[in-house]
Image (spheres, rainbow, N blue to C red):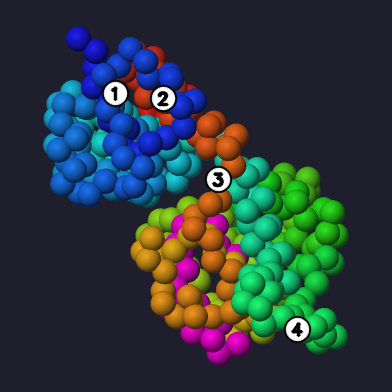
Amino acid sequence: MPEKVLVTRKVPDAGLRLLEGFDVTVLAEQPPERGELLEAVRGAAGILPTVTEKIDAEVMDAAGGDLRVIANMAVGYDNIDVEAATERGVVVTNTPEVLNETTADTAFMLLLAAARRLGEAERLLRSGRWDAWGPKQLTGPDVWGKRLGIIGFGRIGQVLARRTKGFDMELAYHDQYRNEEAERELGARYLELDELLRTCDFISIHTPLTPETTHLIGAEELRKMKPEAVLVNTSRGPVVDESALADALAEGLIFASGLDVYENEPEVHPKLLELENVVLAPHIGSASIETRDKMATLAAQNLAAVLRGKEPKTPVNG
């Protein structure tokens, strides 16, 4: 009898095709309600969740003793209780590397859009309120030749750094660990966080969400930034104190922000929704057709490998 696999959302067919031979249940397009998830997971040997599903000890226990693998379709895995999985002998995997380029594109897109006030400009035009070109209308800071500070200099942070070459930007970064090889390759300078905040014109966040990085950027950190600075976040929402950011933007402590992630997704702080100087995207960092296909494929390959007694490509706890 084929083993049961639960796919918690409708994912690209490129991944689902690799699960032929298993008893696959695919839930709806929208995130499942908690009760629906707990019911659907019963008897599953493998779970393929997305970032929107919290896979904790309760879910694992609801699945039962057959559960052997949780193959997250995301590079981050803060939605999964890895410790609880390890205690139960369950392998956890993720999908690194395949979304680096696309997420870096999104970060640079938000950086440009926030600096050049693209969202505000489009709203002006679509509302019919644009009546003439003006010499001071919708001006923002240049991006080229400025200093970009990258917080979190891992895979995506380094790919973003490469994007800046054509803009002749000066590069700085902060990370838990220095990477002198990457510094030499990319021409980046390591800075302590306070100095990066004080001296950079643009700041892009690419750190994973951990207890140490939760609210890494709060009111105190925002006050250290330049008044003309632009803050971009495509990592995880809770890395930035959303309320403090809304206040900083409203008070003009920083020039603008571009966000793709939020503290309580899909909710967005209501004050942010009212502000003109923030570009808001609905977690589309990896949303290219090719990249989502690759993410679904890698997640399915990981899941199938474990259930067939093989090593997964990208284990988190194995």
- For the point 82% across and 53% down, the residue is 165
Whole-number angstrom distance, CA of label 1 to CA of label 2? 9 Å
Please report contact status of discs 3 and 4: CB closer than 8 Å, yes or no: no
How far is mark 3 from mark 4, CA to CA? 35 Å
Q: What kind of element bears circle 2?
A: helix
Q: Which callout, 1 or 4, points to the residue nearer the camera? A: 4
Mark 1: amino acid: Val
Residue displayed at 83% across by 59% down = 167
* Residue range highlighted in magenta: 232-252
Seen in the image, is 276 located left or right of residue 8? Answer: right
Q: Where residue 287 is drawn, which disc sits there?
A: 3
- From this viewpoint, is residue 3 visible? yes
The numbered mark, 2 or 4, whose residue comes first in the sequence reads 2
* Disc 2/disc 4 C-alpha distance (Å): 51 Å
Residue 24: give its label.
1
Is there a contact, CB below 8 Å, between mark 3 and mark 2? Answer: no
Please state if 42 lies on the left or on the right of 197 as rendered: left
Q: Which mark is residue 131?
A: 4
Q: Secondary structure at mark 4?
A: loop
